[in-house]
Image (cartoon, coloured by chain):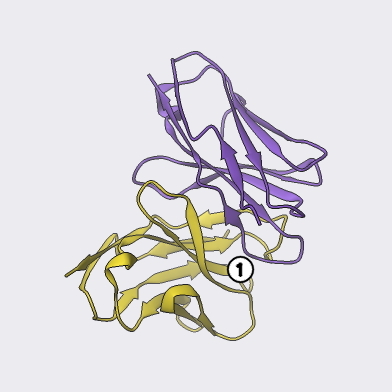
Chain colours: A yellow, B purple
Amino acid sequence: AQSVTQLDSHVSVSEGTPVLLRCNYSSSYSPSLFWYVQHPNKGLQLLLKYTSAATLVKGINGFEAEFKKSETSFHLTKPSAHMSDAAEYFCVVSDGYGGATNKLIFGTGTLLAVQP
Amino acid sequence: DAGVTQSPTHLIKTRGQHVTLRCSPISGHKSVSWYQQVLGQGPQFIFQYYEKEERGRGNFPDRFSARQFPNYSSELNVNALLLGDSALYLCASCPEEDYGYTFGSGTRLTVV
């Protein structure tokens, strides 16, 4: 069965410093992986997705993630945090090969706080 | 283009009542999924519909049901509401060949 584990429930950084949000996955085949962001009282926004193409995936708002099969990891990074990045971030795996007929399995979320 | 739209945005119901939540996918998207997000947790899969057929069901009781209409919009129905059904209900749609789901802003259901 597919699953993801987000290693930190809370991360706090200062504005202008790098962001690292950690995610490990478990999958019996090559997974489709995603990062979603949720701002307070909002829906979910797709940041980026990995679907077996390039292992370094670039997303919106300067975020990127690297798929490392040997480490079963898909960590989310950003070189310089902005106040507007404060939100909850979810690492997500698709239960199949991706596409319109697969369900998404969410991690427990990482709450990112950005200090001025 | 309009995104995924959900209605209503907020809803307060009494225990034992029934509720219907509605979702309109992005134009051209044939797949609609429903998720429940309890406060402080990640979303949990409830249902998926593709081309008006149920393609998946999560670990939810039979009080939860859904359907998809010919125009690909969808309804989620919950009967005999319990306090524990209080949550944000999210709808997502996906194009046939893509791997990224687009979520609506959700319906906040409070059961009192």
Residue at 55 percent across and 63 percent down: it is: A93
Q: Is residue A47 left or right of residue A96?
A: left
Q: Image height check: is A40 above or below A79?
A: above
Tell me the subunit letter for badge 1: A
Q: Is residue A54 left or right of residue B71?
A: left
Residue at 51 percent across and 42 percent down: it is: B106
- What residue type is disc 1 on? Ser
Q: How many marks?
A: 1
Residue at 53 percent across and 16 percent down: it is: B80
* Residue A40 rendering spot, x and y as whole percentages: 35, 50
Label 1, on which residue?
A28
Residue at 48 percent across and 55 percent down: it is: A44
Q: Image height check: is B83 above or below B22?
A: above
Q: Quadrant of the C terminus of chain A?
A: bottom left
Crowd around label 1: few <14 · some 14–19 · many ≥20 (10 Å) = few
* Residue A91 rendering spot, x and y as whole percentages: 46, 64
* Residue A112 rendering spot, x and y as whole percentages: 29, 64
Q: Is residue A89 left or right of residue A28?
A: left
Q: Image height check: is A2 above or below A55?
A: above
Q: Quadrant of the N terminus of chain A?
A: bottom right
Q: Out of A73 and A65, give the one closest to the viewer.
A: A65
Q: Quadrant of residue B112?
A: top left
